[in-house]
């Protein structure tokens, strides 16, 4: 059964996520301690980067577990949004850390502290090894799951950060230029900040029920208007529950004498084929001649005879 196979893959994915999380979180603590002991800001900055990894892995794990929890009477959509909330929180924490590292680096460039480069080199090399291992663990899952993919990319970029730490420690050992440490720290922070900003922006877009990227409301409206028998399209809402789970609700006004069931099937088939929208709620109304003149000529709101009230929400689903 393909279901069993799928379940097995998911469990294997979850196992490698747990392993990668244990490795990363453990080493992150070691890097913070090492950074304080060797006074290396680059190590602390790399630890912040490792925190993004650990957070991405923890979010991926929590999302897998929570998505298994069924929707209940209080949360009719289930727990899919949790992943987005966690991602937004992660991004906010990291923006803060990134800004702190940049500020600290600017102070240290003026008067660099004494740095114990041998310790810094050893810890940086360890970080590199941990990231490499983590990447190997996640490589298989990254091809199938968006969540695993983001965790995999985090590890990949963090490996570059650790490489930077190793290089800086090497340069300091050879030349004694302590300011290199602050420079590498700033470079790692500058690498984190824009990515956090993007993550925050995307998360907020989903939380604000924005139209998912890659979909155009105008295109969907035009396509729905083109379905045979549809006279008008209104109250069209498209939003994402979590990344990759898009929903649509819409009211269609039909020509008189048109079988609503046919139009419904045609419209949902078209939405699935053209826009990959599978979670759709479509309500149809038949426009009668008496109503026609009260209608907006642009095919806007039909004159309702009080059958249902709009309050601007799209949560009253009609089937």
Image (tube, rainbow, N blue to C red):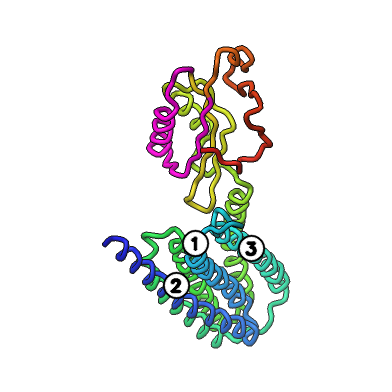
The residue lying furthest to the left in this view is 1
Instruction: Identify the element where label 2 is drawn.
Output: helix
At horizontal 43% and vertical 38% (from top left) the residue drawn is 275
Quickly name the residue at label 3: 89
Mark 3 / mark 1, whichever is N-terminal:
1
Quadrant for the N terminus, please.
bottom left
At horizontal 49% and vertical 67% (from top left) the residue drawn is 65
**Residue 144 image position (x, y, % from top left):** 37, 59
At horizontal 59% and vertical 82% (from top left) the residue drawn is 176
Magenta stretch, residue numbers: 256-285
Alpha carbons under labels 2 and 3: distance apart: 20 Å
Query: In which quarter of the view is residue 189 placed?
Result: bottom right
Mark 2 / mark 3, whichever is N-terminal:
2
Instruction: Identify the element where label 3 is drawn.
Output: helix
Quickly name the residue at label 1: 67
Instruction: Identify the element where label 1 is drawn.
Output: helix
Mark 1 / mark 2, whichever is N-terminal:
2
Quickly name the residue at label 2: 17
Please determine whether, in this image, residue 160 is positioned above or below residue 214: below
At horizontal 61% and vertical 81% (from top left) the residue drawn is 32
Alpha carbons under labels 1 and 2: distance apart: 16 Å
Please determine whether, in this image, residue 279 is positioned above or below residue 285: below
Q: Can residue 184 be seen in this view?
A: yes
**Residue 282 image position (x, y, % from top left):** 50, 35
Q: Residues within 10 Å of mark 1 (few under 14, many from 20)?
A: some
* In this view, the mark in front (1 or 2): 1
* In this view, the mark in front (3 or 1): 1
Alpha carbons under labels 3 and 1: distance apart: 19 Å
| In magenta segment, residue 155 | no
Q: In this view, does 230 lie to the left or right of 37?
A: left
């Amino acid at each position: 059964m393909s279901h069993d196979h799928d379940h097995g893959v998911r469990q294997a994915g979850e196992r490698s996520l747990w392993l990668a999380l244990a490795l990363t979180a453990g080493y992150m603590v070691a890097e913070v301690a090492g950074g304080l002991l060797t006074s290396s800001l680059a190590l602390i900055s790399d630890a912040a980067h490792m925190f993004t990894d650990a957070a991405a892995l923890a979010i991926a794990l929590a999302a897998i577990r929570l998505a298994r929890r069924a929707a209940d009477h209080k949360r009719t959509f289930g727990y899919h949004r949790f992943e987005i909330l966690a991602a937004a929180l992660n991004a906010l924490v990291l923006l803060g850390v990134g800004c702190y590292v940049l500020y600290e680096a600017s102070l240290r460039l003026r008067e660099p502290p004494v740095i114990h480069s041998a310790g810094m080199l050893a810890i940086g090399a360890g970080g590199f090894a941990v990231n490499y291992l983590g990447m190997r663990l996640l490589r298989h899952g990254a091809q199938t799951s968006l969540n695993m993919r983001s965790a995999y990319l985090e590890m990949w970029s963090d490996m570059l950060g650790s490489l930077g730490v190793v290089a800086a420690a090497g340069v300091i050992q050879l030349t004694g230029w302590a300011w290199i440490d602050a420079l590498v720290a700033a470079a790692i922070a500058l690498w984190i900040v824009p990515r956090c900003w993007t993550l925050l922006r995307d998360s907020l877009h989903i939380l604000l029920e924005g139209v998912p990227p890659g979909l155009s409301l105008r295109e969907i409206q035009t396509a729905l208007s083109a379905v045979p028998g549809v006279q008008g399209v209104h109250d069209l809402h498209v939003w994402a529950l979590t990344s990759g789970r898009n929903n649509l609700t819409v009211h269609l006004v039909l020509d008189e004498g048109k079988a609503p069931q046919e139009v419904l099937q045609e419209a949902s088939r078209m939405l699935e084929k053209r826009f990959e929208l599978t979670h759709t709620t479509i309500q149809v109304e038949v426009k009668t001649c008496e109503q026609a003149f009260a209608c907006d000529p642009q095919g806007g709101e039909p004159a309702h005879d009080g059958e249902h009230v709009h309050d601007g929400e799209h949560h009253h689903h009609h089937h």
